[in-house]
Amino acid sequence: MKPFTDTLACRSRKHCGTCRDLVGGRAWRESLGRLLALPGDATDFPCPHGLPWNPSAVQLAAAGAMASAEQAIRAELAKARFAVCLACPRSMDAGFACELHPKCCLGSDRARPGYSCPDSPPRWGPGIDSPLH
């Protein structure tokens, strides 16, 4: 199963109020557990973004602001990496695939700070260009 923490639902932090409501959000977290892998396989798991149980409105607003900033950085990161791919001799399909990664998801992988170019040595990735990793 896909980890919940890898989903846009978690990364966007739009559901933090429900997720971090220890008692009121338990049914919601249980429903997630039927479809996704929860951290530690526990319904009452620690927040991957560091929010406490029953956070204040200020803490939720700060989490939302951080998510917006991270999304903007990811978008810029994906654009920069796409430019590298376009200039790469292994590029295929106008930069949307490469000889080493012909699957269609390379575009979404480029936006992931922890993902590296499949070339050796990598042309982009953690330690090369990623401010979030």
Image (tube, rainbow, N blue to C red):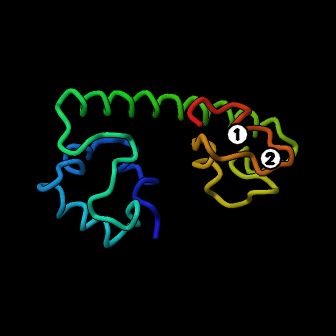
Label 2 SS: strand
Name the residue: 30% across, 40% down.
51
Q: Position of residue 130 (x, y in %)?
A: 64, 33
Name the residue: 17% across, 64% down.
27
Number of marks in the rendered image: 2
- Tell me if 88 is positioned left or right of 42 in this view: right
Name the residue: 30% across, 27% down.
62
The amino acid sitting under disc 2 is Ser
- In the depicted structure, whether residue 124 falls above or below residue 65: below
Name the residue: 38% across, 29% down.
66
- Tell me if 68 is positioned left or right of 109 in this view: left
The amino acid sitting under disc 1 is Gly
Label 1 SS: loop
Residue wearing tag 1: 125
Q: Position of residue 68 (x, y in %)?
A: 39, 30
- In the depicted structure, whether residue 133 falls above or below residue 72: below
For marks 2 and 1 on the same chain, the one whose residue lies earlier in the sequence: 2
Gap between marks 2 and 1, in whole Å?
16 Å
The answer to whether mark 2 and mark 1 are in CB contact below 8 A is: no
Q: Position of residue 21 (x, y in %)?
A: 17, 49
Quadrant of the rendering where the C terminus is positioned: top right
- Tell me if 72 is positioned left or right of 130 in this view: left
Q: Position of residue 64 (x, y in %)?
A: 31, 32
Residue wearing tag 2: 91
Q: Nearer the viewer, mark 2 or mark 1?
A: 1
Q: Hey, which quadrant is residue 40 in on the image? A: bottom left
- In the depicted structure, whether residue 4 falls above or below residue 125: below
